[in-house]
Amino acid sequence: MKKKVLYHTEIENTAGIAGKIQALTGGEFKQLTSSPLTDNPGTNPEQLLGGALVTCLNATIEAEEKRRGLQHQSIVRASVDMGRDIKGFQFWIQAQVKIPHVSVKEAQEILAICEQRCPVAKLLAASPNVEVKLVDKFDFKEEAK
């Protein structure tokens, strides 16, 4: 499939974890970064990755709700855990999706379609450390390791 670019941006980090990221193209974006293991101000890769997934997936669900003539009521939350492995660090991500205004069957259909359409969900889909699930109540307590 030929690549048809609808939007392009370039993001730069010059200082590693304790610094900033900024967009070089595609609109203004500047953000301080810091390690999640410190109290220093700034975001971190865990928050950026979780934010990218929940924003993209919920925007995709919103489009599907609209296509079906439904009001947008879905909520997507993610937990992102970081831990050590034998080569350094890794992430475990769980996204929980709540679509309260439709039946469970229709919510499952919507989510299945949207996981196939959402660019971020598609990038993460092959990882065994990523789970997306439909819920009627948000609860990450059991998932923490």
Image: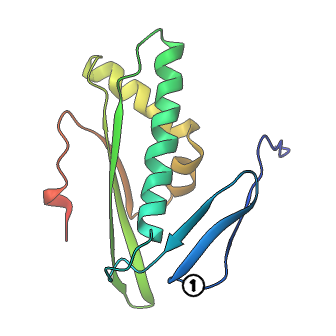
Whether residue 113 is visible, yes or no, is no
Q: Please tell me whether residue 68 is drawn above or below residue 61 in the rendered image.
A: above
Quadrant of res 6: top right
**Relative image position of residue 145 (x, y in whole percent):** 19, 71
Q: Please tell me whether residue 15 is drawn above or below residue 111 in the rendered image.
A: below
**Relative image position of residue 113 (x, y in whole percent):** 49, 30
Q: Residues within 10 Å of mark 1 (few under 14, many from 20)?
A: few
Quadrant in which the N terminus is drawn = top right
Q: Please tell me whether residue 54 is drawn above or below residue 11 in the rendered image.
A: above
**Relative image position of residue 82 (x, y in whole percent):** 34, 75
Is residue 79 or residue 38 the one in the foreground? Answer: 38
Q: Amino acid at mark 1?
A: Gly
Residue at image x 19%, y 33%? Answer: 136
Provide the residue designation for mark 1: 16
Helix, strand or loop at label 1? It is: loop
**Relative image position of residue 110 (x, y in whole percent):** 42, 26
Q: Please tell me whether residue 73 is drawn above or below residue 126 in the rendered image.
A: above
